[in-house]
Image (cartoon, grey):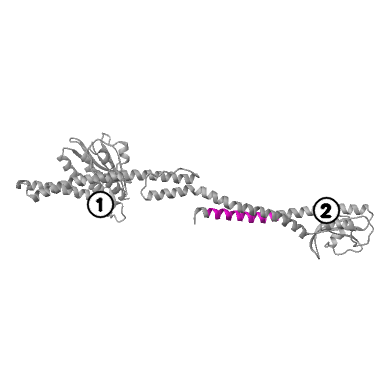
Amino acid sequence: MSIVTRTVLLTSTVAVIVVVVAVAVSYLLINAATLQQSRERLSRLTDITAAALDRGGLEIGSSSLLPRELERTLIAEQISGYIVDAGNVSPLGLSETEIQSLMGGAAVSTEGLTAAGPVLIEARKMSGDLALVLQLPIRVVGGSAQALLLRFGIALLLGLFISVPIGYWAAQRLTRPLRAARQAANQLATGSRDVLLLAEGPSEIADISEALNHLSAELAVSEGRQREFLLSISHELRTPLTAVRGYGEALADGVIPADAVARTGATLTAEATRLDRLVSDLLDLARLGAVNFQMTPLDTDLAELVREAGEVWADRCAKVGVEFRCDTPSDPLIAQLDPVRLRQVIDNLAENALRVSPEGSSIVLSVGSDGRSALLEVQDAGPGLTPEDIAVAFEPGVLHERYRGVRPVGTGLGLALVGRLATGLGGQASAGQALGGGARFMVRLPLVG
Protein backbone atom coordinates (compact mmCIF):
# COMPACT_ATOMS: atom_id res chain seq x y z
CA MET A 1 0.00 0.00 0.00
CA SER A 2 1.46 3.34 -1.03
CA ILE A 3 2.12 6.26 1.30
CA VAL A 4 -0.50 8.29 -0.57
CA THR A 5 -3.19 5.64 0.03
CA ARG A 6 -2.19 5.26 3.65
CA THR A 7 -2.21 9.01 4.16
CA VAL A 8 -5.66 9.36 2.61
CA LEU A 9 -6.98 6.46 4.70
CA LEU A 10 -5.43 7.90 7.82
CA THR A 11 -6.80 11.40 7.27
CA SER A 12 -10.21 9.96 6.38
CA THR A 13 -10.24 7.76 9.48
CA VAL A 14 -9.26 10.69 11.67
CA ALA A 15 -11.95 12.82 10.02
CA VAL A 16 -14.59 10.11 10.61
CA ILE A 17 -13.59 9.79 14.26
CA VAL A 18 -13.72 13.56 14.63
CA VAL A 19 -17.18 13.65 13.02
CA VAL A 20 -18.51 10.87 15.25
CA VAL A 21 -17.12 12.44 18.41
CA ALA A 22 -18.28 15.90 17.34
CA VAL A 23 -21.81 14.63 16.61
CA ALA A 24 -22.02 12.76 19.93
CA VAL A 25 -20.79 15.71 21.96
CA SER A 26 -22.89 18.14 19.92
CA TYR A 27 -26.01 16.04 20.49
CA LEU A 28 -25.55 16.20 24.24
CA LEU A 29 -24.79 19.93 24.20
CA ILE A 30 -27.53 20.84 21.70
CA ASN A 31 -30.12 18.67 23.46
CA ALA A 32 -29.30 20.24 26.83
CA ALA A 33 -29.33 23.76 25.38
CA THR A 34 -32.60 23.18 23.50
CA LEU A 35 -34.21 21.71 26.62
CA GLN A 36 -33.14 24.73 28.65
CA GLN A 37 -34.43 27.16 26.01
CA SER A 38 -37.75 25.29 25.76
CA ARG A 39 -38.12 25.36 29.55
CA GLU A 40 -37.48 29.12 29.59
CA ARG A 41 -39.94 29.71 26.73
CA LEU A 42 -42.60 27.57 28.41
CA SER A 43 -42.07 29.47 31.68
CA ARG A 44 -42.60 32.82 29.95
CA LEU A 45 -45.72 31.55 28.15
CA THR A 46 -47.10 30.27 31.44
CA ASP A 47 -46.54 33.62 33.13
CA ILE A 48 -48.14 35.50 30.22
CA THR A 49 -51.10 33.12 29.94
CA ALA A 50 -51.81 33.18 33.70
CA ALA A 51 -51.68 36.99 33.76
CA ALA A 52 -53.97 37.22 30.72
CA LEU A 53 -56.52 34.86 32.28
CA ASP A 54 -56.50 36.78 35.56
CA ARG A 55 -57.15 40.05 33.78
CA GLY A 56 -60.07 38.47 31.91
CA GLY A 57 -61.80 37.43 35.15
CA LEU A 58 -62.06 33.80 34.17
CA GLU A 59 -64.71 31.83 35.99
CA ILE A 60 -64.63 28.21 34.95
CA GLY A 61 -65.05 24.83 36.57
CA SER A 62 -62.17 22.63 37.60
CA SER A 63 -60.18 20.83 34.95
CA SER A 64 -61.77 23.01 32.28
CA LEU A 65 -59.87 23.65 29.09
CA LEU A 66 -58.50 27.06 28.28
CA PRO A 67 -60.49 29.45 26.14
CA ARG A 68 -60.48 28.40 22.55
CA GLU A 69 -58.49 31.41 21.25
CA LEU A 70 -55.66 30.95 23.70
CA GLU A 71 -55.73 27.22 23.18
CA ARG A 72 -55.06 27.62 19.44
CA THR A 73 -52.00 29.70 20.23
CA LEU A 74 -50.65 27.08 22.58
CA ILE A 75 -51.48 24.25 20.18
CA ALA A 76 -49.33 25.97 17.55
CA GLU A 77 -46.48 25.57 20.06
CA GLN A 78 -47.67 21.98 20.73
CA ILE A 79 -48.32 22.99 24.33
CA SER A 80 -51.22 21.54 26.30
CA GLY A 81 -52.90 23.77 28.95
CA TYR A 82 -55.13 23.04 31.96
CA ILE A 83 -56.85 25.08 34.63
CA VAL A 84 -57.31 23.24 37.89
CA ASP A 85 -58.49 23.99 41.41
CA ALA A 86 -57.73 22.44 44.71
CA GLY A 87 -61.05 20.64 44.92
CA ASN A 88 -60.83 18.56 41.75
CA VAL A 89 -57.34 17.96 40.42
CA SER A 90 -56.78 15.63 37.41
CA PRO A 91 -53.54 13.60 37.13
CA LEU A 92 -51.29 16.05 35.30
CA GLY A 93 -47.85 14.52 36.00
CA LEU A 94 -47.55 16.55 39.19
CA SER A 95 -46.98 14.97 42.58
CA GLU A 96 -49.17 15.81 45.56
CA THR A 97 -46.34 17.79 47.09
CA GLU A 98 -45.94 19.85 43.92
CA ILE A 99 -49.74 20.44 43.75
CA GLN A 100 -49.82 21.62 47.35
CA SER A 101 -46.89 23.92 46.67
CA LEU A 102 -48.67 25.24 43.56
CA MET A 103 -51.91 25.94 45.42
CA GLY A 104 -49.87 27.64 48.07
CA GLY A 105 -48.80 30.22 45.48
CA ALA A 106 -45.42 28.88 44.46
CA ALA A 107 -44.41 28.60 40.80
CA VAL A 108 -43.76 25.00 39.77
CA SER A 109 -41.20 24.13 37.10
CA THR A 110 -40.58 20.41 36.66
CA GLU A 111 -40.78 17.36 34.43
CA GLY A 112 -43.46 14.75 34.59
CA LEU A 113 -44.83 11.66 32.95
CA THR A 114 -48.26 11.67 31.29
CA ALA A 115 -50.12 9.30 29.02
CA ALA A 116 -48.46 11.08 26.08
CA GLY A 117 -44.98 10.52 27.50
CA PRO A 118 -42.51 12.70 29.39
CA VAL A 119 -43.32 16.42 29.43
CA LEU A 120 -41.99 19.72 30.68
CA ILE A 121 -44.43 21.24 33.18
CA GLU A 122 -44.85 24.86 34.20
CA ALA A 123 -47.61 25.75 36.66
CA ARG A 124 -48.71 29.10 38.15
CA LYS A 125 -51.24 30.01 40.85
CA MET A 126 -54.04 32.25 39.61
CA SER A 127 -56.69 34.24 41.50
CA GLY A 128 -58.96 32.28 43.75
CA ASP A 129 -58.37 28.58 43.99
CA LEU A 130 -57.43 28.22 40.34
CA ALA A 131 -54.07 27.35 38.84
CA LEU A 132 -52.71 27.21 35.29
CA VAL A 133 -50.68 24.22 34.13
CA LEU A 134 -48.88 24.12 30.75
CA GLN A 135 -47.16 21.00 29.38
CA LEU A 136 -44.68 20.64 26.52
CA PRO A 137 -43.83 17.10 25.34
CA ILE A 138 -40.09 16.46 25.56
CA ARG A 139 -40.26 14.66 22.21
CA VAL A 140 -41.05 18.05 20.65
CA VAL A 141 -37.94 19.48 22.27
CA GLY A 142 -35.90 16.44 21.12
CA GLY A 143 -37.27 16.84 17.59
CA SER A 144 -35.94 20.38 17.42
CA ALA A 145 -32.58 19.28 18.75
CA GLN A 146 -32.43 16.41 16.26
CA ALA A 147 -33.26 18.72 13.37
CA LEU A 148 -30.47 21.08 14.41
CA LEU A 149 -28.12 18.16 14.94
CA LEU A 150 -28.99 16.76 11.51
CA ARG A 151 -28.00 20.01 9.85
CA PHE A 152 -24.80 20.05 11.89
CA GLY A 153 -24.05 16.43 10.93
CA ILE A 154 -24.60 17.17 7.25
CA ALA A 155 -22.10 20.02 7.47
CA LEU A 156 -19.54 17.71 9.10
CA LEU A 157 -20.06 15.03 6.44
CA LEU A 158 -19.58 17.59 3.72
CA GLY A 159 -16.33 18.56 5.43
CA LEU A 160 -15.33 14.88 5.45
CA PHE A 161 -16.00 14.47 1.73
CA ILE A 162 -14.01 17.63 1.04
CA SER A 163 -11.11 16.47 3.21
CA VAL A 164 -10.57 13.26 1.20
CA PRO A 165 -9.49 14.93 -2.08
CA ILE A 166 -7.57 17.57 -0.13
CA GLY A 167 -5.75 14.79 1.78
CA TYR A 168 -5.00 13.01 -1.49
CA TRP A 169 -3.60 16.19 -3.02
CA ALA A 170 -1.52 16.94 0.09
CA ALA A 171 -0.19 13.37 0.21
CA GLN A 172 0.77 13.50 -3.47
CA ARG A 173 2.60 16.77 -2.90
CA LEU A 174 4.38 15.55 0.23
CA THR A 175 5.48 12.27 -1.32
CA ARG A 176 6.74 13.80 -4.57
CA PRO A 177 10.28 14.25 -3.15
CA LEU A 178 10.15 10.65 -1.89
CA ARG A 179 9.27 9.38 -5.34
CA ALA A 180 12.15 11.41 -6.75
CA ALA A 181 14.44 9.92 -4.08
CA ARG A 182 13.30 6.41 -5.02
CA GLN A 183 14.07 7.06 -8.68
CA ALA A 184 17.48 8.50 -7.75
CA ALA A 185 18.27 5.43 -5.61
CA ASN A 186 17.38 3.16 -8.54
CA GLN A 187 19.65 5.19 -10.79
CA LEU A 188 22.48 4.87 -8.27
CA ALA A 189 21.89 1.11 -8.17
CA THR A 190 22.29 0.91 -11.96
CA GLY A 191 25.64 2.73 -11.84
CA SER A 192 24.65 6.33 -12.54
CA ARG A 193 26.71 8.79 -10.50
CA ASP A 194 25.47 12.15 -11.82
CA VAL A 195 22.31 12.05 -9.72
CA LEU A 196 21.36 15.36 -8.12
CA LEU A 197 18.18 15.89 -6.11
CA LEU A 198 16.58 19.17 -5.07
CA ALA A 199 16.23 19.40 -1.28
CA GLU A 200 12.51 20.21 -1.15
CA GLY A 201 9.56 19.31 1.03
CA PRO A 202 9.55 18.89 4.83
CA SER A 203 12.95 18.92 6.54
CA GLU A 204 12.95 15.14 7.09
CA ILE A 205 12.35 14.45 3.39
CA ALA A 206 14.81 17.17 2.34
CA ASP A 207 17.42 15.45 4.53
CA ILE A 208 16.90 12.24 2.54
CA SER A 209 17.56 14.11 -0.72
CA GLU A 210 20.73 15.64 0.69
CA ALA A 211 21.87 12.23 1.99
CA LEU A 212 21.37 10.68 -1.46
CA ASN A 213 23.31 13.54 -3.07
CA HIS A 214 26.13 12.94 -0.58
CA LEU A 215 25.98 9.20 -1.24
CA SER A 216 26.21 9.79 -5.00
CA ALA A 217 29.27 12.02 -4.55
CA GLU A 218 30.98 9.58 -2.18
CA LEU A 219 30.28 6.64 -4.49
CA ALA A 220 31.84 8.54 -7.38
CA VAL A 221 34.95 9.28 -5.29
CA SER A 222 35.16 5.70 -4.02
CA GLU A 223 34.80 4.18 -7.47
CA GLY A 224 37.41 6.59 -8.80
CA ARG A 225 39.83 5.42 -6.13
CA GLN A 226 39.04 1.81 -6.93
CA ARG A 227 39.79 2.39 -10.60
CA GLU A 228 43.07 4.09 -9.74
CA PHE A 229 43.91 1.29 -7.32
CA LEU A 230 43.23 -1.40 -9.94
CA LEU A 231 45.34 0.46 -12.47
CA SER A 232 48.24 0.73 -10.04
CA ILE A 233 47.94 -2.95 -9.04
CA SER A 234 47.84 -3.93 -12.71
CA HIS A 235 51.02 -1.96 -13.27
CA GLU A 236 52.73 -3.54 -10.24
CA LEU A 237 51.74 -7.05 -11.38
CA ARG A 238 52.76 -6.47 -14.98
CA THR A 239 56.34 -5.43 -14.11
CA PRO A 240 57.45 -8.73 -12.47
CA LEU A 241 55.35 -10.74 -14.95
CA THR A 242 57.20 -9.10 -17.82
CA ALA A 243 60.54 -9.94 -16.24
CA VAL A 244 59.50 -13.56 -15.53
CA ARG A 245 58.24 -14.05 -19.06
CA GLY A 246 61.31 -12.44 -20.61
CA TYR A 247 63.78 -14.51 -18.64
CA GLY A 248 61.68 -17.63 -19.16
CA GLU A 249 61.66 -17.16 -22.92
CA ALA A 250 65.40 -16.50 -22.84
CA LEU A 251 66.00 -19.72 -20.93
CA ALA A 252 63.72 -21.65 -23.28
CA ASP A 253 65.49 -20.25 -26.33
CA GLY A 254 68.90 -21.06 -24.85
CA VAL A 255 70.20 -17.51 -25.19
CA ILE A 256 71.31 -17.30 -21.55
CA PRO A 257 75.00 -18.18 -21.14
CA ALA A 258 75.74 -21.09 -18.84
CA ASP A 259 77.52 -18.89 -16.32
CA ALA A 260 74.44 -16.59 -16.12
CA VAL A 261 71.82 -19.28 -15.54
CA ALA A 262 72.19 -19.16 -11.75
CA ARG A 263 71.87 -15.38 -11.72
CA THR A 264 68.87 -15.58 -14.02
CA GLY A 265 67.26 -18.17 -11.75
CA ALA A 266 67.82 -15.92 -8.75
CA THR A 267 66.18 -13.03 -10.62
CA LEU A 268 63.20 -15.21 -11.54
CA THR A 269 62.89 -16.33 -7.92
CA ALA A 270 62.96 -12.74 -6.68
CA GLU A 271 60.32 -11.62 -9.18
CA ALA A 272 58.16 -14.66 -8.38
CA THR A 273 58.48 -13.86 -4.67
CA ARG A 274 57.42 -10.30 -5.39
CA LEU A 275 54.40 -11.58 -7.32
CA ASP A 276 53.55 -13.97 -4.50
CA ARG A 277 53.66 -11.14 -1.97
CA LEU A 278 51.40 -8.96 -4.11
CA VAL A 279 48.87 -11.75 -4.58
CA SER A 280 49.01 -12.68 -0.87
CA ASP A 281 48.41 -9.08 0.15
CA LEU A 282 45.46 -8.83 -2.22
CA LEU A 283 43.97 -12.05 -0.87
CA ASP A 284 44.45 -10.98 2.75
CA LEU A 285 42.90 -7.60 2.03
CA ALA A 286 39.89 -9.29 0.45
CA ARG A 287 39.54 -11.84 3.25
CA LEU A 288 39.60 -9.14 5.93
CA GLY A 289 36.22 -8.00 4.67
CA ALA A 290 34.84 -11.52 4.60
CA VAL A 291 33.00 -13.27 7.39
CA ASN A 292 35.23 -16.35 7.29
CA PHE A 293 38.53 -14.54 7.92
CA GLN A 294 40.18 -16.61 10.64
CA MET A 295 42.22 -15.37 13.58
CA THR A 296 43.60 -17.52 16.42
CA PRO A 297 43.81 -15.47 19.62
CA LEU A 298 46.56 -16.55 22.05
CA ASP A 299 48.15 -15.03 25.13
CA THR A 300 51.03 -13.16 23.50
CA ASP A 301 53.91 -11.23 25.02
CA LEU A 302 54.03 -8.15 22.83
CA ALA A 303 57.47 -7.12 24.07
CA GLU A 304 58.98 -10.49 23.14
CA LEU A 305 57.22 -10.49 19.74
CA VAL A 306 58.53 -7.01 18.93
CA ARG A 307 62.09 -7.99 19.96
CA GLU A 308 62.01 -11.03 17.67
CA ALA A 309 60.79 -8.91 14.76
CA GLY A 310 63.42 -6.28 15.58
CA GLU A 311 66.27 -8.76 15.16
CA VAL A 312 65.13 -9.59 11.63
CA TRP A 313 64.63 -5.96 10.59
CA ALA A 314 67.89 -4.83 12.16
CA ASP A 315 69.77 -7.11 9.74
CA ARG A 316 67.75 -5.94 6.75
CA CYS A 317 68.28 -2.27 7.60
CA ALA A 318 72.01 -2.75 8.18
CA LYS A 319 72.42 -4.12 4.66
CA VAL A 320 71.18 -0.84 3.16
CA GLY A 321 72.87 1.52 5.61
CA VAL A 322 69.84 2.39 7.73
CA GLU A 323 70.09 2.40 11.52
CA PHE A 324 67.42 0.33 13.29
CA ARG A 325 66.47 0.68 16.95
CA CYS A 326 64.05 -1.50 18.90
CA ASP A 327 62.65 -0.19 22.22
CA THR A 328 60.72 -2.63 24.41
CA PRO A 329 59.95 -2.77 28.14
CA SER A 330 61.61 -5.35 30.34
CA ASP A 331 58.29 -6.52 31.75
CA PRO A 332 55.95 -8.67 29.64
CA LEU A 333 52.98 -7.07 27.89
CA ILE A 334 50.35 -9.79 27.58
CA ALA A 335 47.57 -9.41 25.02
CA GLN A 336 44.99 -11.88 23.75
CA LEU A 337 45.47 -11.82 19.98
CA ASP A 338 46.80 -13.69 16.93
CA PRO A 339 50.64 -13.34 17.01
CA VAL A 340 51.01 -14.26 13.33
CA ARG A 341 48.72 -11.43 12.27
CA LEU A 342 50.44 -8.98 14.61
CA ARG A 343 53.80 -9.94 13.11
CA GLN A 344 52.25 -9.25 9.71
CA VAL A 345 51.35 -5.76 10.96
CA ILE A 346 54.92 -5.13 12.19
CA ASP A 347 56.48 -6.41 8.94
CA ASN A 348 54.26 -4.21 6.78
CA LEU A 349 55.01 -1.10 8.84
CA ALA A 350 58.75 -1.86 8.85
CA GLU A 351 58.75 -2.57 5.10
CA ASN A 352 57.00 0.74 4.48
CA ALA A 353 59.46 2.61 6.72
CA LEU A 354 62.52 1.03 5.11
CA ARG A 355 61.27 1.89 1.64
CA VAL A 356 61.14 5.65 2.31
CA SER A 357 64.16 5.94 4.66
CA PRO A 358 67.36 7.21 2.96
CA GLU A 359 70.76 5.74 3.69
CA GLY A 360 72.18 7.00 6.99
CA SER A 361 68.75 7.62 8.52
CA SER A 362 67.12 5.63 11.31
CA ILE A 363 63.98 3.59 11.98
CA VAL A 364 62.54 3.08 15.47
CA LEU A 365 60.31 0.15 16.39
CA SER A 366 58.87 0.38 19.91
CA VAL A 367 56.10 -0.91 22.13
CA GLY A 368 54.89 0.49 25.45
CA SER A 369 51.91 0.46 27.78
CA ASP A 370 49.66 2.96 29.55
CA GLY A 371 48.26 0.29 31.88
CA ARG A 372 45.17 -0.70 29.94
CA SER A 373 46.47 -0.89 26.37
CA ALA A 374 49.73 -1.29 24.49
CA LEU A 375 51.00 1.15 21.86
CA LEU A 376 53.09 -0.27 19.02
CA GLU A 377 54.96 2.39 17.02
CA VAL A 378 57.15 2.54 13.92
CA GLN A 379 58.91 5.83 13.12
CA ASP A 380 60.98 6.59 10.05
CA ALA A 381 63.07 9.48 8.77
CA GLY A 382 61.45 9.68 5.35
CA PRO A 383 59.58 12.57 3.71
CA GLY A 384 56.71 12.27 6.20
CA LEU A 385 52.97 12.72 5.79
CA THR A 386 50.80 15.77 5.29
CA PRO A 387 47.53 16.15 7.24
CA GLU A 388 45.74 15.12 4.03
CA ASP A 389 47.94 12.01 3.80
CA ILE A 390 47.23 11.07 7.41
CA ALA A 391 43.48 11.13 6.77
CA VAL A 392 43.75 8.52 3.97
CA ALA A 393 46.89 6.66 5.03
CA PHE A 394 45.12 3.29 5.47
CA GLU A 395 42.98 3.43 2.35
CA PRO A 396 44.15 1.02 -0.40
CA GLY A 397 46.25 2.63 -3.11
CA VAL A 398 45.58 6.30 -2.23
CA LEU A 399 49.14 7.22 -1.20
CA HIS A 400 50.54 5.07 -4.01
CA GLU A 401 48.58 7.00 -6.59
CA ARG A 402 49.38 10.34 -4.96
CA TYR A 403 53.19 9.88 -4.80
CA ARG A 404 53.90 7.45 -7.62
CA GLY A 405 56.97 8.75 -9.44
CA VAL A 406 57.63 11.34 -6.72
CA ARG A 407 58.98 9.21 -3.89
CA PRO A 408 59.50 5.48 -3.22
CA VAL A 409 56.07 3.96 -2.77
CA GLY A 410 54.63 0.46 -2.66
CA THR A 411 51.34 -0.80 -3.97
CA GLY A 412 49.36 0.78 -1.16
CA LEU A 413 48.25 -2.62 0.10
CA GLY A 414 50.56 -2.82 3.12
CA LEU A 415 49.10 0.08 5.10
CA ALA A 416 45.57 -0.96 4.14
CA LEU A 417 46.32 -4.41 5.60
CA VAL A 418 47.71 -2.81 8.76
CA GLY A 419 44.53 -0.78 9.29
CA ARG A 420 42.20 -3.72 8.84
CA LEU A 421 44.36 -6.21 10.73
CA ALA A 422 44.55 -3.80 13.66
CA THR A 423 40.77 -3.66 13.78
CA GLY A 424 40.57 -7.45 13.51
CA LEU A 425 43.00 -7.76 16.44
CA GLY A 426 40.71 -5.61 18.57
CA GLY A 427 42.77 -2.46 18.28
CA GLN A 428 43.10 0.63 16.10
CA ALA A 429 45.74 1.94 13.71
CA SER A 430 46.58 5.61 13.25
CA ALA A 431 49.18 7.72 11.50
CA GLY A 432 50.99 10.93 12.33
CA GLN A 433 54.21 12.89 12.03
CA ALA A 434 57.39 11.92 13.88
CA LEU A 435 59.04 14.54 16.08
CA GLY A 436 62.22 14.65 14.05
CA GLY A 437 60.47 14.54 10.70
CA GLY A 438 59.26 11.49 8.87
CA ALA A 439 56.17 9.43 9.46
CA ARG A 440 54.89 7.77 12.61
CA PHE A 441 52.49 4.82 12.53
CA MET A 442 50.79 3.59 15.71
CA VAL A 443 48.70 0.56 16.57
CA ARG A 444 46.89 0.56 19.92
CA LEU A 445 46.03 -2.91 21.27
CA PRO A 446 44.11 -4.01 24.38
CA LEU A 447 46.05 -5.80 27.13
CA VAL A 448 44.83 -8.71 29.23
CA GLY A 449 43.51 -7.74 32.65
Q: Does 183 sit above or below residue 121?
A: above
Read off the magenta span: 6-28
Question: For this rendering, which residue is in front, 298 or 108?
Answer: 108
The circle on residue 43 is 2
Mark 1 residue crowding within 10 angstroms, few (<14) / some (14–19) / many (20+): few
Secondary-structure class at tag 1? helix
Question: From the viewer's perspective, is 363 left or right of 124?
Answer: left
Q: In terms of secondary structure, where does tag 2 sit?
A: helix
- Magenta region's main secondary structure? helix
Labels 1 and 2 touching (C-beta < 8 A): no
Task: Report the amino acid beneath label 1.
Answer: Leu
In the image, is residue 26 part of the stretch drawn in magenta?
Answer: yes
Q: Relative to 330, is 151 above or below?
A: below
Q: Earlier in the sequence, mark 1 or mark 2?
A: 2
The CA span between labels 1 and 2 is 101 Å
Front residue of 175/400: it is 175
Q: Which residue bears the numbered disc 1?
A: 283
Residue 46: x percent and y percent? 85, 54
Between 13 and 310, which is closer to the camera in this rendering? 13
Q: Amino acid at mark 2?
A: Ser
Sort mark 2 into few (<14), some (14-19) or many (20+) by Cα contacts within 10 Å.
Answer: many
Q: Position of residue 403 (x, y in %)?
A: 25, 38
Q: Nearer the viewer, residue 163 or 397?
A: 163
From this viewpoint, is residue 23 visible?
yes
Q: Is residue 288 left or right of residue 126?
A: left
Q: Which mark is residue 345?
A: none
